[in-house]
């Protein structure tokens, strides 16, 4: 089986050091294993997108020496915003199989009625599943519905190549989660599962901020008959206040003019211990060392990690 990895940024802002770390990790792991590395733009949530950010990210990746393979015969980069028909097809499959249901509840209604807290907030109390007559009434007054996946009261576990065994009971920890929003936009959880399957992704190396999402994605893979990829979640870069680097925390964009230094710093963050003199090498030489000496096992088994030089 050929190794196929990917880097899938969201165009909510320019590429920052945290995103660079994830890109370096996925790229080195794919190239070390003589595999393909794809780039996918996860722009399914259009209201959060910053105009021009997608093009800026792609230009920055090119300036840093990343070389990605073709995602399909027509385009080298997949944009989720152009794949709604595909997501609708698989949503319809889940509908036909009885795995999802419509939900008209507002956030306030959920907050007022929920009695159990999960790892990401209130657990949806299945109001629209248990009281379909109320749902019909709400649809007449509140308009469109969202669609939720029904979860089972059983553990879903997987072995992460960095973080070790991860186990989650979706009914207790997450609850029935949304696959399509009331505004018609598809949720990340469905889009990413469909795209990974259709692109033949075999290995996913990404930030540990998505670790809690993985059991949901494995559950959907099982429902849709997809193969589950191998997962490896690298530590998320946080600032001195313990905040994930992002547009909201005013993370600085990476500068292509010092690309060799920043790739070197990313390798240090990932526990690869490049020789100090590598910092002064050309970008091509840094990449040659990084790929030849890549060791996934050296990445720290942490979910969050600060980096003092930032």
Image (cartoon, rainbow, N blue to C red):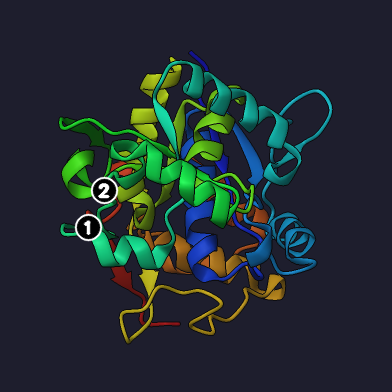
Residue 86: percent from left, percent from top = 67, 28
Residue extending farthest right: 74
Residue 310 vertical placement versus 277 (above, below): below
Q: Look at the picture and state if 188 lies above or below 37.
A: below
The secondary structure type at the circle numbered 1 is loop
Q: Can you identify the residue that label 2 sits on?
A: 174
Q: Is residue 103 above or below residue 106?
A: above
Above-or-below relation of 23 to 133: below
Count residues near mark 2 (Cα–Cα under 10 Å), then give few for <14, some for 14-19, many for 20+: many
The quarter of the rendered structure image containing the C terminus is: bottom left
* Residue 137 in sight here: yes
Using residue 94 as the reference point, say whether residue 144 is left or right of it.
Answer: right
N-term mark: 2 or 1: 1
- Alpha carbon of mark 2 to alpha carbon of mark 1: how far? 7 Å
The picture places residue 274, in percent across and down from the top left corner, at 41, 59
In the image, 116: left or right of 224? Answer: left
Please name the residue that numbered disc 1 is placed on: 119
Residue 284: x %, y % from top left: 66, 53
Residue found 58% across the figure and 81% down from its top: 252
């Amino acid at each position: 089986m050929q190794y196929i990895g990917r880097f899938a940024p969201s165009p909510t802002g320019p590429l920052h050091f945290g995103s660079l770390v994830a890109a370096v990790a996925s790229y080195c792991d794919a190239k070390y294993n003589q595999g393909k590395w794809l780039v996918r733009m996860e722009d399914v949530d259009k209201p959060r997108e910053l105009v021009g950010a997608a093009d800026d990210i792609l230009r920055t990746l090119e300036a840093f020496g990343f070389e990605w393979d073709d995602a399909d015969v027509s385009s080298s980069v997949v944009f989720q915003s152009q794949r709604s028909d595909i997501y609708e097809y698989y949503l319809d499959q889940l509908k036909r199989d009885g795995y999802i249901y419509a939900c008209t509840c507002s956030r306030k209604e959920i907050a007022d009625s929920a009695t159990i807290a999960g790892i990401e907030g209130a657990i949806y109390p299945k109001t629209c599943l248990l009281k379909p007559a109320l749902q019909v009434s709400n649809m007449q007054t509140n308009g469109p519905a969202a669609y939720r996946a029904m979860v089972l009261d059983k553990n879903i576990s997987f072995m992460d190549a960095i973080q070790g065994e991860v186990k989650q009971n979706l009914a207790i920890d997450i609850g029935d989660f949304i696959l399509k929003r009331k505004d018609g936009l598809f949720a990340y959880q469905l889009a990413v599962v469909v795209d990974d399957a259709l692109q033949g992704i075999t290995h996913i190396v990404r930030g540990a901020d998505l670790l809690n999402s993985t059991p949901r994605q494995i559950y959907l893979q099982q429902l849709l008959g997809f193969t589950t990829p191998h997962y490896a979640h690298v530590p998320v870069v946080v600032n001195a206040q313990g905040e994930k680097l992002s547009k909201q925390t005013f993370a600085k964009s990476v500068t292509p003019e010092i690309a060799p230094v920043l790739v070197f710093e990313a390798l240090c963050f990932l526990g690869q211990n490049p020789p100090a003199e590598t910092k002064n090498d050309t970008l091509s030489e840094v990449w040659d060392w990084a790929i030849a000496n890549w060791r996934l096992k050296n990445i720290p088994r942490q979910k969050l990690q600060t980096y003092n030089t930032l």
